Amino acid sequence: MAIAAKYDAKSVEEKWYKYWLQHNYFHSEVDDREAYTIVIPPPNVTGVLHMGHMLNNTIQDVLIRRARLKGYNACWVPGTDHASIATEAKVVAKLKEDGINKNDLTREEFLEHAWEWTHKHGGIILEQLKKLGASCDWERTAFTMDDNLSASVIKVFVDLYNKGLVYRGYRMVNWDPEAKTTLSDEEVIYEEKQGNLYYLKYKIEGSDDTLTIATTRPETIMGDTAICINPNDERFTHLKGKKAIVPIANRIIPIIEDEYVDMEFGTGCLKVTPAHDQNDKVLGDKHNLEVIDIFNDDASLNSFGLHYEGKDRFVVRKEIVKELESIGVLEKTETHLNKVGTSERTKAVIEPKLSDQWFLKMKDLAQPALDSVLNKDVNLVPEKFINTYRYWMENVRDWNISRQLWWGHQIPAYFYGDGKEDFVVAESAEEALSLAQEKTGNKELLATDLTQDPDALDTWFSSWLWPMSVFNGILEPDNKEINYYYPTNDLVTAPEILFFWVARMIIAGYEYRGEKPFTNVYLTGIVRDKQRRKMSKSLGNSPDPLDLIEQYGADGIRVGMLLSSPAGNDLMFDEDLCKQGSGFVNKIFNASKLIFGWEVDDAIEQPKASAVAIDWYTSKFQKALVELENNYNKYRISDALMTTYKLIWDDFCGWLLEMIKPAYQSPIDAKTYKEVIAILEDNLKILHPFVPFISEEIWQQITDRTPEQALIIESWPKSKTIDEKLTQEFEIAAEVISGIRTIRKEKNIAFKDAITLSVLNNEKSNTTFDSVISKLGNLSALAYVEDKVEGALSFRVKSNEYFIPVSGAINIEEEVKKLSEELAYTEGFLKSVQKKLQNERFVNNAPDKVIAIERKKEADAEAKIVTLKSSLAGLKG
């Protein structure tokens, strides 16, 4: 068989990916087989491949390729998410570069630019996934803004509104002043930051007295509408019923009483700013306080900010502190650690803001989704995430689903009047007009009298339908595809979107199909560098995945990513792992090349060593197959790889090929060759999910294959009986071979020089592997003896003793001297270890791990002493 002299990953990967696409192996249609379905966590349409994608999609591809081999109708649906905030930010930045201000455009004009951007950048990440070997059903590629998916989102919004679950409310929301949109609570990251606590004096109206408040945000005094004291605080009895004057603004505000005020915090006097603090808003509503919003949408101050109008909030903070100090209002400043909310997307500091927004009632919707995880209908892997999930779902808040953006699904609410309730919700403008005419009783109402809400829906409000909408299960709930592919099998995603996406998909699944959207959720860890830092562009610690593929090959990267990637635990990425993965691929290639290079002779009888070697490896393979099944079932993908890796590297390459290899320039017997090719084919089948390119390359080299015989659609190896006795006997034989090799190495006995081996068989062990021991040890004779052999070096395996005569091969006097010195040193070492272990103070205070190490040292030294004494006895005769 012709095979290249050196493995060329790039050309091999291009060749076989093209071949797989050409023969449509990735595509799935409804048929009689059992379906196995994965939907991809849709990456942002603006995104490019990063290390997290590499890990996540490698795991998905391993699962989907194995399912194909197991005979399932495997369907992996790819796609992208329109990512409202991220994409709009990129489009706005691009327009700014071109000298265009978004505010100067109509919505339609802006959307033209957004679609242009999407068409230009949208497919990049999916094309990059192909380089990794991702076997997605590309014909099914979906985008959350596709017509069917968009219509599904609108239909669901209208349905939930009609059920009374979607409502419009004037609430305090999280405002991102950079993206100029509201965010849900889950999109806000709270970070502890060092700031200042400013103590400010407010004059009491009609007197020279003052009261002092403490605030972290002095710029918000412009929005103060009251001072609050605790009615039980005796320090402030004299302030009851009085009024205070806001510094700089000189506005008179009431002093109110409420037990909400913590008498221990700050000064015990609290400034109340209902427009800019959630708790202050509650107080304001309770006491009918005025609400003064001092901020523009970009967090600069508006006209209520007086001479600070138009300036950014943080600039104002510095300047107003100086002004307050200059007029004698700033009493003192203290450092203060407090939690600051930042936008997950833009990293901007969040501003609490009162706003009319759309909300979805979550409490009742969440219950079935909580029960499904607690009852293990949906399995979270690893299970440690169940408690996090339970906490979120039991404390779920109403979901703010509106965003002040143009890119996304426009909210299907149509206003026909000036009142807050003057709107209708409908799937189309025509239907909205009909509803509005009916609601108002005005048949003369025209379409031009209606204005659609300009806000877009939260991106997650579309992606929570993903497992259903990609099969058109919302618009056509009884179509054959949704009935066949749903619920899907496995979801592979990151823990940080467990609530954002996973929980919401489960909620949507129960609401719209009455069942779970998937059975298993495999939660990957975060890819970190060796310093445990999360990989990111800003830190500059993340390699370019495409550069890695170019250097190590896609198969090498896949192995490298999975070598240290246990479910739910972070992956400490090290480029050396990719080097190791690439080395593994080369090992597979070179082993196959070795086999293909053997000349086959039909006339030769199969050697006994080859026959037993084949039987042993067959059992070893079957043991690995059971282990693989267990690891895959438990989603221990890294462990499944290690089982495969060790089997191929150690057992196949390290042992089997050595056991059956013909003598130099001699042919191999046909029976052994045929059997090792069958073994190689089985090896390639279990390798394929991890290293699809090299495995397909070798598979196709073995013999001419039709497209129907490609490895990608082959059958997973069948389980057979395991000969446990044979695998155990080999472990002993391997130790014997290792003992022979050690003596050869230490005594400089060349392998070409045959030696004899005598065995004092105290254990009466099986002689099954004697032919293998003779071959791999290059023995001219292997004899069983009743007594120790004099003038020989020896070693032990279990209770058997093995002797290699050394007369003539070495200087016996020198060897006795050398062994005696080694024995004396080892006995001295043993005494020092035992002295330590006899020291009660050490034993009582040292950690268990340290004591265990010392006990192992003791046992190893004792065993070595026995072997050295035995060898000395043999040499002295």
Image (cartoon, rainbow, N blue to C red):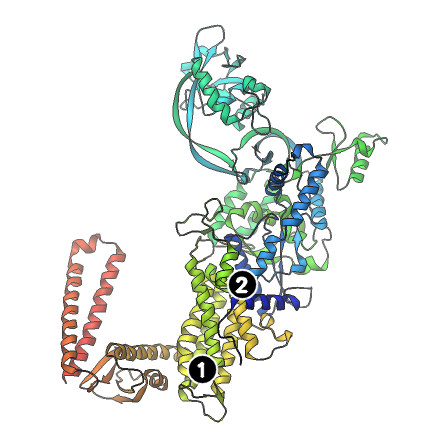
- Residue 73 is situated, as x and y percent measured from the top left of the image, at 63, 66
Q: Secondary structure at mark 1?
A: helix
Contact between labelled residues 2 and 1, with CB atoms less than 8 Å apart: no
Quarter residue 38 falls in: bottom right
Is residue 492 at least partly visible in the picture?
A: yes
Depth check: give the residue in front, 743 or 462: 743
In the shown orientation, is residue 293 left or right of residue 474?
left
Report, in whole angstroms, how far the alpha carbon at label 1 lies from the one at label 2.
28 Å
Quarter residue 451 falls in: top right
User: From this viewpoint, which residue is outermost toward the bottom?
Assistant: 603
In the figure, 232 relative to 842: above or below?
above
Residue 165: numbered disc: none
- Residue 215 is situated, as x and y percent measured from the top left of the image, at 45, 23
Q: Amino acid at mark 1?
A: Ile
The local crowd at label 2, few if under 14, some if 14 to 19, many if 20 or more residues have their Cα within 10 Å, is many
Is residue 798 at least partly visible in the picture?
A: no
| Residue at point 40%, 86% (across, down) | 663
- Residue 555 is situated, as x and y percent measured from the top left of the image, at 51, 64
Q: Which residue is mark 2?
A: 62
Q: Secondary structure at mark 2?
A: helix
Depth check: give the residue in front, 33 or 448: 448
Q: Which residue is mark 1?
A: 614
User: From this viewpoint, which residue is outermost toward the right?
Assistant: 444
Q: Amino acid at mark 2?
A: Val
